[in-house]
Protein backbone atom coordinates (compact mmCIF):
# COMPACT_ATOMS: atom_id res chain seq x y z
CA UNK A 1 0.00 0.00 0.00
CA UNK A 2 1.51 3.28 -1.17
CA UNK A 3 0.20 6.53 0.38
CA UNK A 4 -0.36 9.39 -2.10
CA UNK A 5 0.26 11.92 0.65
CA UNK A 6 3.57 11.58 2.52
CA UNK A 7 1.98 13.50 5.40
CA UNK A 8 -0.76 10.88 5.75
CA UNK A 9 -0.16 10.09 9.41
CA UNK A 10 -0.48 13.68 10.64
CA UNK A 11 -3.54 14.15 8.41
CA UNK A 12 -5.20 11.00 9.80
CA UNK A 13 -4.43 11.94 13.41
CA UNK A 14 -5.75 15.48 12.96
CA UNK A 15 -9.02 14.23 11.45
CA UNK A 16 -9.45 11.63 14.21
CA UNK A 17 -9.06 14.46 16.74
CA UNK A 18 -11.98 16.25 15.07
CA UNK A 19 -14.28 13.23 15.61
CA UNK A 20 -15.76 14.51 18.85
CA UNK A 21 -17.49 11.19 19.47
CA UNK A 22 -14.11 9.49 19.87
CA UNK A 23 -13.29 11.70 22.86
CA UNK A 24 -16.81 11.22 24.22
CA UNK A 25 -16.43 7.42 24.12
CA UNK A 26 -12.80 7.49 25.27
CA UNK A 27 -11.34 5.95 22.09
CA UNK A 28 -7.71 6.34 21.00
CA UNK A 29 -6.03 6.00 17.63
CA UNK A 30 -3.08 3.81 18.57
CA UNK A 31 -1.55 2.95 15.20
CA UNK A 32 -1.47 4.50 11.72
CA UNK A 33 0.28 2.85 8.79
CA UNK A 34 -0.43 3.07 5.04
CA UNK A 35 -3.84 1.41 4.66
CA UNK A 36 -3.99 0.29 8.29
CA UNK A 37 -5.07 1.66 11.67
CA UNK A 38 -5.76 0.43 15.17
CA UNK A 39 -8.31 2.13 17.41
CA UNK A 40 -8.77 1.17 21.06
CA UNK A 41 -11.66 1.67 23.46
CA UNK A 42 -11.34 0.87 27.16
CA UNK A 43 -14.47 -0.87 28.49
CA UNK A 44 -16.96 1.42 30.19
CA UNK A 45 -20.17 0.29 31.87
CA UNK A 46 -21.98 3.35 30.53
CA UNK A 47 -21.52 2.05 26.97
CA UNK A 48 -23.16 -1.34 27.56
CA UNK A 49 -26.31 -3.06 26.40
CA UNK A 50 -28.80 -4.88 28.62
CA UNK A 51 -26.48 -7.80 29.53
CA UNK A 52 -23.51 -5.64 30.49
CA UNK A 53 -21.48 -6.10 27.26
CA UNK A 54 -20.31 -3.23 25.06
CA UNK A 55 -23.24 -2.38 22.77
CA UNK A 56 -22.84 -3.76 19.23
CA UNK A 57 -23.33 -0.25 17.88
CA UNK A 58 -20.46 1.09 19.98
CA UNK A 59 -18.22 -1.73 18.78
CA UNK A 60 -19.31 -0.78 15.27
CA UNK A 61 -18.52 2.89 15.87
CA UNK A 62 -14.92 1.98 16.71
CA UNK A 63 -14.58 -0.45 13.77
CA UNK A 64 -16.06 2.13 11.39
CA UNK A 65 -13.62 4.86 12.45
CA UNK A 66 -10.74 2.40 12.16
CA UNK A 67 -11.85 1.47 8.62
CA UNK A 68 -12.45 5.07 7.63
CA UNK A 69 -8.97 6.15 8.69
CA UNK A 70 -7.32 3.11 7.11
CA UNK A 71 -8.93 4.26 3.84
CA UNK A 72 -8.17 7.94 4.50
CA UNK A 73 -4.46 7.18 4.96
CA UNK A 74 -4.23 6.30 1.25
CA UNK A 75 -6.26 9.23 -0.07
CA UNK A 76 -4.92 12.45 -1.60
CA UNK A 77 -4.13 15.31 0.77
CA UNK A 78 -7.23 17.31 -0.19
CA UNK A 79 -9.75 14.47 0.10
CA UNK A 80 -12.43 13.75 2.66
CA UNK A 81 -13.66 10.27 3.58
CA UNK A 82 -17.28 9.22 4.01
CA UNK A 83 -18.73 5.84 5.02
CA UNK A 84 -21.03 4.46 2.33
CA UNK A 85 -21.96 1.26 4.14
CA UNK A 86 -20.67 -1.34 6.58
CA UNK A 87 -21.76 -4.68 7.93
CA UNK A 88 -20.79 -5.93 11.36
CA UNK A 89 -20.98 -9.61 12.31
CA UNK A 90 -20.98 -10.08 16.07
CA UNK A 91 -19.00 -13.16 17.09
CA UNK A 92 -18.93 -13.12 20.89
CA UNK A 93 -20.05 -10.89 23.78
CA UNK A 94 -17.88 -7.77 24.05
CA UNK A 95 -16.75 -8.14 27.66
CA UNK A 96 -13.33 -7.51 29.15
CA UNK A 97 -11.08 -4.52 29.69
CA UNK A 98 -10.29 -3.18 26.24
CA UNK A 99 -11.66 -3.31 22.70
CA UNK A 100 -8.99 -3.21 19.98
CA UNK A 101 -10.13 -2.61 16.39
CA UNK A 102 -7.63 -3.48 13.66
CA UNK A 103 -8.55 -2.21 10.20
CA UNK A 104 -6.92 -2.65 6.82
CA UNK A 105 -7.68 -1.62 3.24
CA UNK A 106 -8.64 -4.54 1.03
CA UNK A 107 -8.86 -2.51 -2.17
CA UNK A 108 -8.27 1.20 -2.71
CA UNK A 109 -9.99 2.62 -5.77
CA UNK A 110 -10.22 6.14 -7.11
CA UNK A 111 -13.69 6.68 -5.66
CA UNK A 112 -14.43 3.64 -3.52
CA UNK A 113 -12.22 1.89 -0.96
CA UNK A 114 -13.14 -1.42 0.69
CA UNK A 115 -11.82 -2.15 4.19
CA UNK A 116 -12.05 -4.92 6.72
CA UNK A 117 -11.68 -4.65 10.48
CA UNK A 118 -11.64 -7.09 13.34
CA UNK A 119 -12.56 -6.26 16.89
CA UNK A 120 -10.99 -8.17 19.75
CA UNK A 121 -11.59 -7.82 23.47
CA UNK A 122 -8.72 -8.12 25.91
CA UNK A 123 -10.40 -10.09 28.68
CA UNK A 124 -8.27 -11.12 31.63
CA UNK A 125 -5.22 -11.95 29.54
CA UNK A 126 -7.19 -13.61 26.74
CA UNK A 127 -7.82 -12.01 23.35
CA UNK A 128 -11.35 -12.79 22.14
CA UNK A 129 -12.49 -12.09 18.58
CA UNK A 130 -15.82 -10.31 19.10
CA UNK A 131 -16.70 -8.72 15.76
CA UNK A 132 -15.72 -8.41 12.11
CA UNK A 133 -16.67 -5.64 9.68
CA UNK A 134 -16.48 -5.10 5.93
CA UNK A 135 -16.93 -1.45 4.98
CA UNK A 136 -17.09 0.70 1.85
CA UNK A 137 -15.59 4.17 2.06
CA UNK A 138 -15.87 6.98 -0.47
CA UNK A 139 -13.20 9.50 -1.43
CA UNK A 140 -14.76 12.94 -1.70
CA UNK A 141 -12.75 15.75 -3.28
CA UNK A 142 -13.69 19.36 -3.75
CA UNK A 143 -17.16 19.60 -2.29
CA UNK A 144 -16.27 21.87 0.53
CA UNK A 145 -15.62 19.17 3.08
CA UNK A 146 -12.25 19.11 4.79
CA UNK A 147 -10.61 15.98 6.15
CA UNK B 1 -47.57 -9.56 13.96
CA UNK B 2 -48.81 -11.42 17.04
CA UNK B 3 -46.82 -11.06 20.28
CA UNK B 4 -46.34 -14.30 22.25
CA UNK B 5 -46.11 -12.35 25.49
CA UNK B 6 -49.05 -10.03 26.26
CA UNK B 7 -46.71 -8.07 28.54
CA UNK B 8 -44.35 -7.35 25.66
CA UNK B 9 -44.36 -3.57 25.97
CA UNK B 10 -43.34 -3.48 29.63
CA UNK B 11 -40.70 -6.14 28.95
CA UNK B 12 -39.25 -4.15 26.03
CA UNK B 13 -39.23 -0.89 28.00
CA UNK B 14 -37.55 -2.52 31.01
CA UNK B 15 -34.81 -4.02 28.85
CA UNK B 16 -34.24 -0.72 27.02
CA UNK B 17 -33.78 0.91 30.44
CA UNK B 18 -31.00 -1.59 31.17
CA UNK B 19 -29.05 -0.50 28.05
CA UNK B 20 -26.86 1.99 29.85
CA UNK B 21 -25.51 3.29 26.55
CA UNK B 22 -28.96 4.62 25.63
CA UNK B 23 -28.92 6.94 28.66
CA UNK B 24 -25.31 7.90 27.94
CA UNK B 25 -26.22 8.93 24.38
CA UNK B 26 -29.53 10.51 25.39
CA UNK B 27 -31.74 8.12 23.37
CA UNK B 28 -35.42 7.47 24.11
CA UNK B 29 -37.71 4.60 23.20
CA UNK B 30 -40.71 6.53 21.91
CA UNK B 31 -42.94 3.79 20.47
CA UNK B 32 -43.44 0.06 21.05
CA UNK B 33 -45.88 -2.01 19.01
CA UNK B 34 -45.84 -5.73 18.12
CA UNK B 35 -42.81 -6.08 15.85
CA UNK B 36 -42.15 -2.33 15.71
CA UNK B 37 -40.31 0.32 17.69
CA UNK B 38 -39.17 3.90 17.34
CA UNK B 39 -36.06 5.19 19.07
CA UNK B 40 -35.08 8.87 19.04
CA UNK B 41 -31.76 10.61 19.61
CA UNK B 42 -31.50 14.40 19.88
CA UNK B 43 -28.46 15.72 18.02
CA UNK B 44 -25.42 16.34 20.18
CA UNK B 45 -22.15 17.83 18.98
CA UNK B 46 -20.21 15.44 21.18
CA UNK B 47 -21.48 12.49 19.11
CA UNK B 48 -20.22 13.79 15.77
CA UNK B 49 -17.58 12.78 13.27
CA UNK B 50 -15.03 15.06 11.66
CA UNK B 51 -17.51 17.08 9.56
CA UNK B 52 -19.95 17.77 12.40
CA UNK B 53 -22.56 15.13 11.48
CA UNK B 54 -23.72 12.36 13.84
CA UNK B 55 -21.15 9.56 13.51
CA UNK B 56 -22.37 6.65 11.35
CA UNK B 57 -21.66 4.29 14.24
CA UNK B 58 -23.89 6.28 16.57
CA UNK B 59 -26.68 6.27 13.99
CA UNK B 60 -26.11 2.51 13.77
CA UNK B 61 -26.28 2.13 17.55
CA UNK B 62 -29.75 3.67 17.56
CA UNK B 63 -30.94 1.64 14.54
CA UNK B 64 -29.59 -1.57 16.10
CA UNK B 65 -31.40 -1.01 19.39
CA UNK B 66 -34.59 -0.20 17.51
CA UNK B 67 -34.27 -3.43 15.51
CA UNK B 68 -33.39 -5.48 18.57
CA UNK B 69 -36.45 -4.31 20.47
CA UNK B 70 -38.74 -4.72 17.47
CA UNK B 71 -37.60 -8.37 17.41
CA UNK B 72 -37.73 -8.70 21.21
CA UNK B 73 -41.38 -7.53 21.28
CA UNK B 74 -42.38 -10.76 19.51
CA UNK B 75 -40.25 -13.13 21.59
CA UNK B 76 -41.40 -15.34 24.48
CA UNK B 77 -41.35 -13.80 27.95
CA UNK B 78 -38.23 -15.71 29.05
CA UNK B 79 -36.11 -14.96 25.98
CA UNK B 80 -33.13 -12.69 25.48
CA UNK B 81 -32.23 -10.98 22.20
CA UNK B 82 -28.76 -10.75 20.66
CA UNK B 83 -27.63 -9.03 17.47
CA UNK B 84 -26.05 -11.50 15.05
CA UNK B 85 -25.27 -8.98 12.31
CA UNK B 86 -26.42 -5.77 10.72
CA UNK B 87 -25.58 -3.67 7.70
CA UNK B 88 -26.07 0.08 7.58
CA UNK B 89 -26.22 2.01 4.32
CA UNK B 90 -25.60 5.71 4.85
CA UNK B 91 -27.76 7.83 2.56
CA UNK B 92 -27.15 11.43 3.61
CA UNK B 93 -25.23 13.37 6.28
CA UNK B 94 -26.88 13.03 9.70
CA UNK B 95 -27.37 16.71 10.50
CA UNK B 96 -30.36 18.39 12.09
CA UNK B 97 -32.05 18.38 15.47
CA UNK B 98 -33.26 14.82 15.99
CA UNK B 99 -32.58 11.32 14.69
CA UNK B 100 -35.64 9.08 14.55
CA UNK B 101 -35.10 5.34 13.98
CA UNK B 102 -38.14 3.35 12.88
CA UNK B 103 -37.71 -0.42 13.02
CA UNK B 104 -39.95 -3.29 12.00
CA UNK B 105 -39.72 -7.07 11.91
CA UNK B 106 -39.59 -8.47 8.39
CA UNK B 107 -39.68 -12.11 9.45
CA UNK B 108 -39.86 -13.60 12.92
CA UNK B 109 -38.54 -17.16 13.16
CA UNK B 110 -38.07 -19.48 16.11
CA UNK B 111 -34.35 -18.72 16.38
CA UNK B 112 -33.67 -15.92 13.93
CA UNK B 113 -35.59 -12.69 13.33
CA UNK B 114 -34.84 -10.30 10.46
CA UNK B 115 -35.59 -6.59 10.92
CA UNK B 116 -35.27 -3.43 8.90
CA UNK B 117 -34.93 0.11 10.21
CA UNK B 118 -34.79 3.53 8.65
CA UNK B 119 -33.14 6.53 10.21
CA UNK B 120 -34.41 10.01 9.44
CA UNK B 121 -33.12 13.37 10.64
CA UNK B 122 -35.51 16.14 11.50
CA UNK B 123 -33.64 19.10 10.04
CA UNK B 124 -35.33 22.48 10.24
CA UNK B 125 -38.79 21.14 9.45
CA UNK B 126 -37.60 18.71 6.78
CA UNK B 127 -37.37 14.94 7.30
CA UNK B 128 -34.24 13.54 5.61
CA UNK B 129 -33.68 9.82 5.14
CA UNK B 130 -30.10 9.35 6.36
CA UNK B 131 -29.65 5.60 6.85
CA UNK B 132 -31.21 2.19 6.35
CA UNK B 133 -30.36 -1.04 8.17
CA UNK B 134 -31.14 -4.72 7.75
CA UNK B 135 -30.36 -6.74 10.87
CA UNK B 136 -30.50 -10.34 12.06
CA UNK B 137 -31.46 -10.93 15.68
CA UNK B 138 -31.26 -14.19 17.63
CA UNK B 139 -33.70 -15.45 20.23
CA UNK B 140 -31.76 -16.91 23.16
CA UNK B 141 -33.64 -18.95 25.74
CA UNK B 142 -32.34 -20.58 28.89
CA UNK B 143 -28.66 -19.76 28.85
CA UNK B 144 -28.72 -17.62 31.95
CA UNK B 145 -29.26 -14.33 30.16
CA UNK B 146 -32.25 -12.23 31.14
CA UNK B 147 -33.97 -9.77 28.84
CA UNK C 1 -38.14 9.59 -9.04
CA UNK C 2 -37.30 11.58 -12.15
CA UNK C 3 -35.32 9.85 -14.94
CA UNK C 4 -32.54 11.95 -16.50
CA UNK C 5 -32.88 10.04 -19.75
CA UNK C 6 -36.37 9.95 -21.29
CA UNK C 7 -35.33 6.82 -23.17
CA UNK C 8 -34.57 5.01 -19.92
CA UNK C 9 -36.85 2.03 -20.51
CA UNK C 10 -35.35 1.07 -23.87
CA UNK C 11 -31.86 1.58 -22.46
CA UNK C 12 -32.60 -0.66 -19.45
CA UNK C 13 -34.16 -3.38 -21.60
CA UNK C 14 -31.26 -3.36 -24.05
CA UNK C 15 -28.69 -3.70 -21.27
CA UNK C 16 -30.67 -6.51 -19.61
CA UNK C 17 -30.60 -8.32 -22.96
CA UNK C 18 -26.80 -8.13 -22.90
CA UNK C 19 -26.64 -9.92 -19.53
CA UNK C 20 -26.13 -13.36 -21.00
CA UNK C 21 -26.59 -14.98 -17.60
CA UNK C 22 -30.23 -13.84 -17.54
CA UNK C 23 -31.00 -15.91 -20.63
CA UNK C 24 -28.98 -18.82 -19.24
CA UNK C 25 -31.06 -18.83 -16.04
CA UNK C 26 -34.34 -18.10 -17.84
CA UNK C 27 -34.97 -14.72 -16.17
CA UNK C 28 -37.21 -12.02 -17.62
CA UNK C 29 -37.38 -8.27 -17.00
CA UNK C 30 -41.12 -7.85 -16.52
CA UNK C 31 -41.43 -4.23 -15.37
CA UNK C 32 -39.40 -1.04 -15.77
CA UNK C 33 -40.41 2.24 -14.14
CA UNK C 34 -38.30 5.20 -12.99
CA UNK C 35 -36.25 3.79 -10.11
CA UNK C 36 -38.10 0.46 -10.11
CA UNK C 37 -37.90 -2.90 -11.86
CA UNK C 38 -39.32 -6.41 -11.54
CA UNK C 39 -37.36 -9.45 -12.66
CA UNK C 40 -38.88 -12.94 -12.70
CA UNK C 41 -37.31 -16.39 -12.68
CA UNK C 42 -39.38 -19.54 -13.17
CA UNK C 43 -38.28 -22.32 -10.81
CA UNK C 44 -35.89 -24.84 -12.33
CA UNK C 45 -34.56 -27.92 -10.56
CA UNK C 46 -31.15 -27.39 -12.14
CA UNK C 47 -30.75 -24.13 -10.17
CA UNK C 48 -31.29 -25.69 -6.74
CA UNK C 49 -29.18 -26.30 -3.66
CA UNK C 50 -28.96 -29.56 -1.74
CA UNK C 51 -32.55 -29.48 -0.37
CA UNK C 52 -34.22 -28.72 -3.68
CA UNK C 53 -34.78 -24.98 -3.15
CA UNK C 54 -33.47 -22.29 -5.49
CA UNK C 55 -29.86 -21.61 -4.44
CA UNK C 56 -29.47 -18.42 -2.36
CA UNK C 57 -26.87 -17.23 -4.86
CA UNK C 58 -29.30 -17.59 -7.75
CA UNK C 59 -31.95 -15.68 -5.82
CA UNK C 60 -29.26 -13.05 -5.21
CA UNK C 61 -28.36 -12.94 -8.91
CA UNK C 62 -31.95 -12.01 -9.76
CA UNK C 63 -32.24 -9.47 -6.92
CA UNK C 64 -28.91 -7.89 -7.92
CA UNK C 65 -29.94 -7.45 -11.56
CA UNK C 66 -33.28 -6.00 -10.45
CA UNK C 67 -31.47 -3.50 -8.19
CA UNK C 68 -28.90 -2.67 -10.83
CA UNK C 69 -31.53 -1.85 -13.42
CA UNK C 70 -33.66 0.10 -10.95
CA UNK C 71 -30.56 2.28 -10.39
CA UNK C 72 -29.67 2.35 -14.09
CA UNK C 73 -33.13 3.64 -15.01
CA UNK C 74 -32.28 6.94 -13.26
CA UNK C 75 -28.77 7.34 -14.66
CA UNK C 76 -27.69 9.58 -17.55
CA UNK C 77 -27.86 8.08 -21.04
CA UNK C 78 -24.08 7.59 -21.31
CA UNK C 79 -23.57 5.92 -17.93
CA UNK C 80 -22.81 2.35 -16.99
CA UNK C 81 -23.87 0.69 -13.73
CA UNK C 82 -21.68 -1.49 -11.51
CA UNK C 83 -22.56 -3.31 -8.29
CA UNK C 84 -20.36 -2.16 -5.43
CA UNK C 85 -21.87 -4.43 -2.78
CA UNK C 86 -25.07 -6.13 -1.70
CA UNK C 87 -26.34 -8.09 1.26
CA UNK C 88 -29.04 -10.71 1.00
CA UNK C 89 -31.03 -11.90 4.01
CA UNK C 90 -32.72 -15.24 3.35
CA UNK C 91 -36.14 -15.40 4.98
CA UNK C 92 -37.67 -18.70 3.83
CA UNK C 93 -36.84 -21.59 1.49
CA UNK C 94 -37.17 -20.56 -2.17
CA UNK C 95 -39.63 -23.21 -3.31
CA UNK C 96 -42.60 -22.82 -5.62
CA UNK C 97 -43.15 -22.02 -9.26
CA UNK C 98 -41.79 -18.52 -9.76
CA UNK C 99 -39.40 -16.09 -8.11
CA UNK C 100 -40.38 -12.43 -8.45
CA UNK C 101 -37.80 -9.78 -7.52
CA UNK C 102 -39.12 -6.27 -6.94
CA UNK C 103 -36.44 -3.58 -6.71
CA UNK C 104 -36.61 0.13 -5.98
CA UNK C 105 -34.13 2.96 -5.57
CA UNK C 106 -33.91 4.24 -2.00
CA UNK C 107 -31.52 7.09 -2.77
CA UNK C 108 -30.01 8.10 -6.08
CA UNK C 109 -26.78 10.07 -5.78
CA UNK C 110 -24.39 11.40 -8.38
CA UNK C 111 -21.96 8.51 -7.92
CA UNK C 112 -23.67 6.06 -5.59
CA UNK C 113 -27.24 4.74 -5.65
CA UNK C 114 -28.75 2.63 -2.88
CA UNK C 115 -31.48 0.13 -3.76
CA UNK C 116 -33.62 -2.42 -1.97
CA UNK C 117 -35.25 -5.50 -3.42
CA UNK C 118 -37.58 -8.16 -2.13
CA UNK C 119 -37.83 -11.65 -3.51
CA UNK C 120 -41.11 -13.54 -3.27
CA UNK C 121 -41.92 -17.06 -4.42
CA UNK C 122 -45.26 -17.84 -5.97
CA UNK C 123 -45.95 -21.20 -4.37
CA UNK C 124 -49.29 -22.83 -5.14
CA UNK C 125 -51.25 -19.62 -5.00
CA UNK C 126 -49.40 -18.23 -1.99
CA UNK C 127 -46.82 -15.45 -2.18
CA UNK C 128 -43.94 -16.14 0.23
CA UNK C 129 -41.33 -13.52 1.08
CA UNK C 130 -38.06 -15.44 0.67
CA UNK C 131 -35.31 -12.81 0.57
CA UNK C 132 -34.51 -9.13 0.98
CA UNK C 133 -31.49 -7.25 -0.39
CA UNK C 134 -29.91 -3.85 0.13
CA UNK C 135 -27.43 -2.96 -2.61
CA UNK C 136 -25.07 -0.14 -3.52
CA UNK C 137 -24.68 0.66 -7.21
CA UNK C 138 -22.12 2.95 -8.83
CA UNK C 139 -22.65 5.25 -11.79
CA UNK C 140 -19.67 4.99 -14.12
CA UNK C 141 -19.30 7.56 -16.89
CA UNK C 142 -16.64 7.80 -19.54
CA UNK C 143 -14.35 4.89 -18.81
CA UNK C 144 -15.06 3.02 -21.97
CA UNK C 145 -17.87 0.91 -20.59
CA UNK C 146 -21.21 1.01 -22.35
CA UNK C 147 -24.53 0.30 -20.63
CA UNK D 1 -10.75 -26.08 13.88
CA UNK D 2 -11.86 -29.51 15.11
CA UNK D 3 -14.52 -31.37 13.09
CA UNK D 4 -17.22 -33.08 15.18
CA UNK D 5 -17.74 -35.67 12.45
CA UNK D 6 -14.62 -37.57 11.35
CA UNK D 7 -16.38 -38.31 8.07
CA UNK D 8 -16.79 -34.60 7.33
CA UNK D 9 -15.08 -34.62 3.94
CA UNK D 10 -17.27 -37.33 2.42
CA UNK D 11 -20.36 -35.65 3.90
CA UNK D 12 -19.39 -32.26 2.43
CA UNK D 13 -18.62 -33.74 -0.98
CA UNK D 14 -21.90 -35.68 -1.08
CA UNK D 15 -23.94 -32.59 -0.22
CA UNK D 16 -22.09 -30.48 -2.80
CA UNK D 17 -23.00 -33.14 -5.38
CA UNK D 18 -26.67 -32.62 -4.50
CA UNK D 19 -26.45 -28.87 -5.30
CA UNK D 20 -27.70 -29.21 -8.86
CA UNK D 21 -26.84 -25.59 -9.58
CA UNK D 22 -23.14 -26.35 -9.14
CA UNK D 23 -23.24 -28.80 -12.05
CA UNK D 24 -25.33 -26.37 -14.07
CA UNK D 25 -22.73 -23.62 -13.62
CA UNK D 26 -19.77 -25.98 -14.00
CA UNK D 27 -18.39 -25.44 -10.47
CA UNK D 28 -16.10 -27.90 -8.68
CA UNK D 29 -15.32 -28.40 -5.00
CA UNK D 30 -11.53 -28.57 -5.15
CA UNK D 31 -10.53 -28.56 -1.47
CA UNK D 32 -12.15 -29.57 1.82
CA UNK D 33 -10.42 -29.12 5.16
CA UNK D 34 -11.89 -28.59 8.65
CA UNK D 35 -13.55 -25.19 8.43
CA UNK D 36 -12.20 -24.47 4.95
CA UNK D 37 -13.15 -25.13 1.34
CA UNK D 38 -12.19 -24.02 -2.15
CA UNK D 39 -14.71 -23.94 -4.98
CA UNK D 40 -13.70 -23.18 -8.57
CA UNK D 41 -15.71 -21.97 -11.55
CA UNK D 42 -14.21 -21.80 -15.05
CA UNK D 43 -15.23 -18.62 -16.87
CA UNK D 44 -18.17 -19.03 -19.22
CA UNK D 45 -19.57 -16.29 -21.45
CA UNK D 46 -23.11 -17.47 -20.74
CA UNK D 47 -22.71 -16.48 -17.06
CA UNK D 48 -21.76 -12.87 -17.76
CA UNK D 49 -23.34 -9.48 -17.17
CA UNK D 50 -23.64 -6.68 -19.70
CA UNK D 51 -19.89 -5.89 -19.89
CA UNK D 52 -18.76 -9.47 -20.36
CA UNK D 53 -17.62 -10.12 -16.76
CA UNK D 54 -18.95 -12.94 -14.58
CA UNK D 55 -22.18 -11.65 -13.03
CA UNK D 56 -21.77 -10.53 -9.40
CA UNK D 57 -24.59 -12.90 -8.44
CA UNK D 58 -22.79 -15.86 -9.97
CA UNK D 59 -19.60 -14.93 -8.13
CA UNK D 60 -21.76 -14.74 -5.00
CA UNK D 61 -23.27 -18.17 -5.69
CA UNK D 62 -19.81 -19.72 -5.68
CA UNK D 63 -18.67 -17.80 -2.58
CA UNK D 64 -21.88 -18.75 -0.74
CA UNK D 65 -21.48 -22.46 -1.46
CA UNK D 66 -17.84 -22.29 -0.40
CA UNK D 67 -18.85 -20.61 2.88
CA UNK D 68 -21.72 -23.01 3.45
CA UNK D 69 -19.51 -26.07 3.08
CA UNK D 70 -16.72 -24.56 5.19
CA UNK D 71 -19.35 -24.24 7.96
CA UNK D 72 -20.88 -27.65 7.21
CA UNK D 73 -17.49 -29.36 7.59
CA UNK D 74 -17.57 -28.52 11.32
CA UNK D 75 -21.19 -29.49 11.96
CA UNK D 76 -22.47 -32.73 13.52
CA UNK D 77 -23.12 -35.65 11.16
CA UNK D 78 -26.92 -35.25 11.29
CA UNK D 79 -27.03 -31.49 10.69
CA UNK D 80 -28.08 -29.46 7.68
CA UNK D 81 -26.69 -26.04 6.78
CA UNK D 82 -28.70 -23.03 5.66
CA UNK D 83 -27.53 -19.56 4.63
CA UNK D 84 -29.00 -16.86 6.87
CA UNK D 85 -27.35 -13.91 5.13
CA UNK D 86 -24.28 -12.84 3.23
CA UNK D 87 -22.77 -9.64 1.93
CA UNK D 88 -20.54 -9.50 -1.12
CA UNK D 89 -18.23 -6.56 -1.83
CA UNK D 90 -17.15 -6.46 -5.46
CA UNK D 91 -13.54 -5.33 -5.80
CA UNK D 92 -12.72 -5.69 -9.49
CA UNK D 93 -14.33 -6.96 -12.71
CA UNK D 94 -14.53 -10.78 -12.74
CA UNK D 95 -12.69 -11.44 -16.00
CA UNK D 96 -10.16 -14.14 -16.77
CA UNK D 97 -10.17 -17.90 -17.05
CA UNK D 98 -11.11 -19.21 -13.62
CA UNK D 99 -12.81 -18.00 -10.45
CA UNK D 100 -11.42 -19.50 -7.25
CA UNK D 101 -13.41 -19.03 -4.05
CA UNK D 102 -11.56 -19.66 -0.79
CA UNK D 103 -13.75 -19.85 2.30
CA UNK D 104 -12.96 -20.25 5.99
CA UNK D 105 -14.91 -20.34 9.21
CA UNK D 106 -14.32 -17.29 11.39
CA UNK D 107 -16.40 -18.52 14.33
CA UNK D 108 -18.35 -21.76 14.70
CA UNK D 109 -21.15 -21.58 17.23
CA UNK D 110 -23.78 -24.12 18.23
CA UNK D 111 -26.45 -22.51 16.04
CA UNK D 112 -24.69 -19.84 14.03
CA UNK D 113 -21.40 -20.00 12.12
CA UNK D 114 -19.72 -16.96 10.56
CA UNK D 115 -17.55 -17.46 7.48
CA UNK D 116 -15.49 -15.31 5.16
CA UNK D 117 -14.58 -16.03 1.56
CA UNK D 118 -12.44 -14.35 -1.04
CA UNK D 119 -12.92 -14.70 -4.76
CA UNK D 120 -9.94 -14.37 -7.09
CA UNK D 121 -9.83 -14.56 -10.87
CA UNK D 122 -6.96 -16.26 -12.61
CA UNK D 123 -6.44 -13.86 -15.52
CA UNK D 124 -3.57 -14.58 -17.87
CA UNK D 125 -1.18 -15.64 -15.13
CA UNK D 126 -2.26 -12.93 -12.69
CA UNK D 127 -4.43 -13.55 -9.64
CA UNK D 128 -6.90 -10.68 -9.16
CA UNK D 129 -8.94 -10.27 -5.98
CA UNK D 130 -12.46 -9.67 -7.30
CA UNK D 131 -14.79 -10.15 -4.34
CA UNK D 132 -15.00 -10.71 -0.60
CA UNK D 133 -17.93 -12.14 1.37
CA UNK D 134 -18.91 -12.40 5.00
CA UNK D 135 -21.71 -14.93 5.58
CA UNK D 136 -23.79 -16.28 8.43
CA UNK D 137 -24.74 -19.96 8.29
CA UNK D 138 -27.21 -21.80 10.50
CA UNK D 139 -26.92 -25.34 11.82
CA UNK D 140 -30.27 -27.08 11.50
CA UNK D 141 -30.78 -30.40 13.30
CA UNK D 142 -33.81 -32.63 13.32
CA UNK D 143 -36.31 -30.81 11.16
CA UNK D 144 -36.42 -33.37 8.43
CA UNK D 145 -33.73 -31.82 6.29
CA UNK D 146 -30.77 -33.97 5.32
CA UNK D 147 -27.34 -32.59 4.51
Image: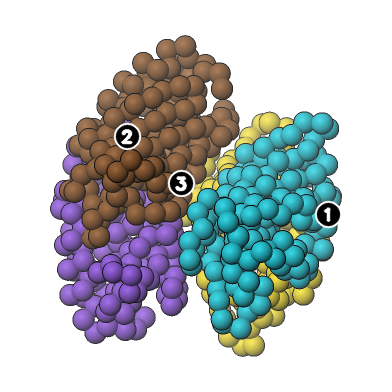
Chain colours: A cyan, B yellow, C purple, D brown
Determine contact: label 1, label 3, CB under 8 Å: no
Viewer-side residue, A115 vs B21: A115
- Using the rendered image, report if marks 1 and 3 lie on a common chain: no
Return the residue at label 2. D40
State the residue at coordinates (70%, 65%).
Answer: A7
At mark 1, the secondary structure is helix
Residue D145 image offset from top left, x and y in percent: 36, 27
Which of the 4 image quarters holds residue C69?
bottom left
Do the numbered discs 3 and 2 sit on residues whose CB atoms are within 8 Å?
A: no
Which residue is labeled 3 in the image? D132
Chain holding disc 1 = A
Q: Which residue is mark 1?
A: A46
- How packed mark 2 is, by other alpha carbons closer than 10 Å (few <14, some 14-19, many 20 or more), is many
Residue B51, horizontal then vertical, whole percent = 68, 75
Quadrant of residue D121 in the image? top left
Distance Cα–Cα, label 1 vs label 2: 48 Å
Mark 3 on the same chain as mark 2? yes
Q: Would residue A22 appear left or right of B118 to someone viewing this image?
A: right
- Residue positioned 76% across, 56% down in the render: A29
Tell me the distance, in whole angstroms, between the alpha carbons under discs 3 and 2. 15 Å
Amino acid sequence: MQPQDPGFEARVRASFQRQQVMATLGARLTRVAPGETDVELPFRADLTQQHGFLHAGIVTTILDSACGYAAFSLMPADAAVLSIEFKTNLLAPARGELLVARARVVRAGRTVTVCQADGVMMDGGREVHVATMTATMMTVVGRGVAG
